[in-house]
Image (cartoon, grey):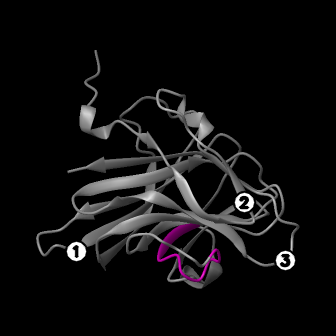
Amino acid sequence: MEFVDPRRAPEAVVWRDMVGTSASAPDPGAPLELSTLTRTAVASGQFDAGAASTQTITRGDGYVEFTATETDKARILGLSTGAPPDLDPGRMDIDFAIRLSNSGDVLVAEHGAIINGGVAYATYAPGDRLRVSVTEQPDGTADVAYALIPSACAGPNCDGTTFLVTHGAAYPFRVDASMREQGATITDARLVRIR
């Protein structure tokens, strides 16, 4: 039998500071699939609809992840430095994020800018999960890692493939999201905090 670390139990992301979006708010005891953020605003061609989490990662290790559903809508999800509120629904204030393109590519954006010259790290398909994780370092900062978890990878110890790690990020972190096209979703958003 596989050991399940109770500290790694995911919690649904609870959204706040919503601009041009709606959230399926999770109820206590409800399935995590109810934590979904959807862009309801008419598309403007900009990342100008989004939200942030009520929860923060104040120390220790943790991650946020979500499930990709549609492959034809651009959205970005990750971790931003600082506690809420977050009054900017755009992508430029998201410090460490995975950006899914509307052509099926997985990109990384840090401090709003796409890194790696805009070259995709992978492609994604419906059902794949994307994760941004933090690992606390001895100096009190965090390493930030980006991973793709294929839909076929199941179980609590399936961490997928990490494709990039950044060093020296400052606590605390909040979950932060932005979407470009109407109907874009951040599905099954979940947060794990290991202290």
Mark 1 = which residue? 141
| Front residue of 8 and 85 | 85
**Residue 186 makes an appearance in the image:** no
Relative height, residue 155 to residue 185 (above, below): above
Which of the pair 14/65 is nearer the observer?
14
- Secondary structure under tag 1 reads loop
Q: Residue at x 59, y 83 (%)?
A: 92
Residue type (three-letter) at the residue carrying disc 2: Thr
Specify the segment rendered in magenta: 89-98
Label 2 environment density (alpha carbons within 10 Å; few <14, some 14–19, many ≥20): many
Q: Toward the viewer: 27 or 157?
A: 27
Give the residue number, with chain letter if any, for mark 2. 21
Could you tell me residue 139's position as x and y percent?
13, 76
Distance of label 3 from label 2 (alpha carbons): 15 Å
At numbered mark 3, what does the secondary structure look like: helix, strand or loop? loop
Q: Alpha-carbon neighbours of circle 1 within 10 Å: few (<14), some, or many (≥20)? A: some
Disc 1 and disc 3: Cα gap in Å? 35 Å
Q: Vertical placement of 33 versus 195: above or below?
A: above
Q: First in sequence: mark 1 or mark 3? A: 3
Sequence-wise, the earlier of marks 2 and 1 is 2
Q: Let me know if residue 92 is in the magenta part.
A: yes
Which quadrant of the view contains residue 81?
bottom left
The quadrant of the image that shows the N terminus is: top left
The residue that disc 3 covers is 45
Closer to us: 31 or 76: 31
Q: Is residue 48 magenta?
A: no
Position of residue 124 relative to residue 102, above or below, is above
What is the CA distance from the residue labelled 2 to the residue labelled 1?
Answer: 32 Å
